[in-house]
Amino acid sequence: MKLVWLVLAAAVVWVLVPETGSAASTPAPACNGGGCGGWFRSNVTVTWSYDPAGVTSAPGCGATTITDDTAGATVTCTVYAGTAFFGNSVSVAKDSSPPSVDATISRSPDADGWYTSPVSVSFSGDGGPSGISSCSGGGTYSGPDGNAVQLSGTCTDGAGNSASSSLTIKYDATPPTVTPTPERPPDVDGWYNHPVKVAFAGQDGGAGVTECTAPVTYAGPDGNPAKLVGQCRDGVGHLSAPATMEIRYDGTKPTRPTVSATRTSGAVTLAWKTSPDAVRAEVVRSPGKTGKKPGVVFAGKGARVVDKSAKGTARYWYEVRVYDQAGNVASRTLPVRPSTGILAPATGAVLRRAPLVQWAPVKKARFYNVQLWRKREKLLTIWPAVPRLRLHETWTFAGRRLRLEDGSYQLYVWPAFGTQSSPRYGKLVGKVKFVVKR
């Protein structure tokens, strides 16, 4: 007989062939029921199959389990049949352990443990028996900012086992942002009219803000807009861009108004002048319309008002207030004396009915003498005790029945002292001409 060696894939087969050419059966391996090539990541059980006819012994041909990682463990099976034998062996590779992974960063931190510009990281590993096949996750990190940024990578060995590792860094490449905040809302219609403090606060997603421009109190000059500028710095030295806050500021009062007053019977006319920046006015009269307390008789735009609620016999104080668009106010108070003379009807008035005659009272006068004339004819003389008299359409005077006809009339009033039986007359209170026309 002769020995024949055969090399088949991962197995080495040897066969002792009898010279007489007796039958032979070479054992075939199976790993976990399948092929035995490549890498296994779990325990591997090697079994053998062969033709048992005529077999006298089969050392090594039972099931063999490989539990340790190995680059190649050899398992052998030999089948004896009489004087012939048939042998086979197989090499099994197992790697069930994940690789170890190391992270490497390209440089040290830039400032106080922080990276302030892009930084590179790479990942490498030890793959054990099967070696490292590939690693991923490396590259250049450029944001976002954070105080615990994780840079992660994964390595895979030749057997397909994977493992990950991470590196934590502090990263801040962005200057802080700045928000200016005034201590209060505008005073009037979007305008500030007295000093206002503005504070500057920063926001930073990385190392945090360490300092900002101190609060600024703005007190002028007037401006639309007036500008306040501030900045902040973060913990790694980044300085923010300047933050500008624009406000409308006017702390200057308008010019005090110059006021003039004209008093007529039953009305006071006020007029005033001030600087062009005044946009509205308010007129307060004391006493007011409903009592002793001051009351507003005008509010709005304009520079003139006619107060028709003023009584001719009363003394008033008028305060004219002028406001600019920022709410600044300037004022002036003007006293208006009671009217003198005849207050009603007005001189030259054209009437359709008999009038109510009113005149300014005279101090200490006990009564008055009122005379009504038409051309050179006296039509009435009467002595009322109060400073008013209601004329009538018809009356009796000097034994005659008279009528208020169309035409021109003159009316005179004198104060009287003493008694009606012994009167003393003072200076003429006033005279007035009016026309009756129906």
Image (cartoon, helix red, strand yellow):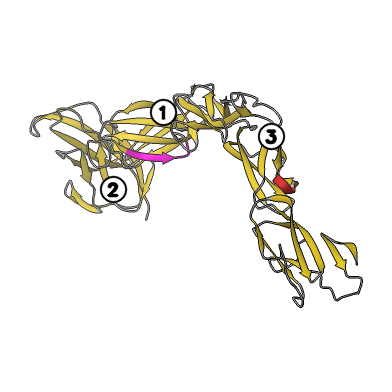
Identify the amino acid type marked 1: Ser
Find residue 357 and report its horizontal and vertical position in percent.
Answer: 26, 43
The part of the image, by quadrant, that contains residue 100 is: top right
Quadrant assignment for the N terminus:
bottom right
Instruction: Please determine whether, in this image, residue 86 is positioned above or below residue 347.
Output: below
Mark 3 element type: strand
What residue did someone put label 2 on? 355
The part of the image, by quadrant, that contains residue 49 is: bottom right
Marks 2 and 1, how far apart at CA: 30 Å
Question: Circles 2 and 1: CB distance less than 8 Å?
Answer: no
- Residue 62 lies within the magenta run: no
**Magenta region, residue range:** 296-303
Q: Which of marks 3 and 2 is in front?
A: 3
Q: N-terminal of the two: label 3 or label 2?
A: 3
Q: Is residue 35 left or right of residue 261?
A: right
Find residue 271 and report its horizontal and vertical position in percent.
Answer: 44, 32
What residue did someone put label 1 on? 260
Q: N-terminal of the two: label 2 or label 1?
A: 1
Q: Is the magenta stretch mostly helix, strand or loop?
A: strand
What residue did someone put label 3 on? 104
Instruction: Please determine whether, in this image, residue 52 is positioned above or below residue 316.
Output: below
Identify the amino acid type marked 2: Pro
